[in-house]
Amino acid sequence: MKYKKFFAIAVCSLLLFTVYFNRDPDRDITKGNNIILSPADGTVEYIKYYKDGNAEVFKDGNCYVLNVSKYFPNGCYIVGIFMSPLDVHVNRAPISGKVVYIKHIDGSFYPAFLDDVEKVNERNIVIIKNGSDYIGVAQISGFVARRCVLNIKEGDYIYAGERIGKIKLGSQTAVIIPTNYTIKVKIGERVYAGQTIIAVKNTNN
């Protein structure tokens, strides 16, 4: 009888967590020109700069050709956001524009909070064209999260804050930003999809 009670509590707890994890609340999307919004809820894990824009992707010593340099000829920033199992895991578009590139890259499933998992873990890469700028989003799997879901395709026009996909359980989402933008977040900061401004365009350039 004792074990049945424990089993029932465990099942109910799992069901409640599943419902909680899969929540998809509506958002008041931040409006504005020349801004890039966070594509995910979570904590800023890293901010990296690539001078030539060629943020190469590696797995087990092998380089996966992801020619982002043609989209970011003057270099790029990458802002990585760690999503814990308690965060909302729906990803949203960081900016309005046309989806010009989608690529799925097979990889490992290391914990998403570890350094450099953006180079080895399985992921989806999305490039969005807004005017003359290109903004990238990477959905990166984690140790438990083994499925990155996109509900958009190349050629779609999407709007800032629009739902574009989801990652299962603990994971990471990264934003690839051209250098004519100024980063407005810092490492350790909490951000929210469709609401937190990640970067602002330098309009005096």
Image (cartoon, grey):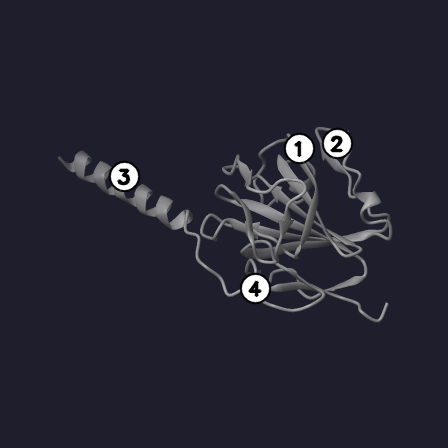
- Secondary element type, mark 2: strand
Mark 2 highlights which residue? Answer: 64
- Secondary element type, mark 4: loop
Mark 4 highlights which residue? Answer: 195
Q: Amino acid at mark 2?
A: Tyr
Q: Is residue 84 left or right of residue 115?
A: left
Circle number at residue 35: none
Whether tag 2 and tag 4 are in contact, CB under 8 A, the answer is no
Q: Earlier in the sequence, mark 1 or mark 3?
A: 3
Q: Earlier in the sequence, mark 3 or mark 4?
A: 3
Q: Quadrant of residue 183?
A: bottom right
Q: Is residue 144 left or right of residue 184?
A: left
Residue 101 percent coordinates (x, y): 71, 41
Q: Earlier in the sequence, mark 2 or mark 4?
A: 2
Q: Dot 2: within a 10 Å radius of its alpha carbon, few (fewer than 14), some, or many (20 or more) residues?
A: some
Residue 78 percent coordinates (x, y): 72, 52
Q: Amino acid at mark 4?
A: Gln
Mark 3 highlights which residue? Answer: 11
How far apart are the alpha carbons under marks 2 and 1?
8 Å
Whether tag 2 and tag 1 are in contact, CB under 8 A, the answer is yes
How far apart are the alpha carbons under marks 2 and 3?
41 Å
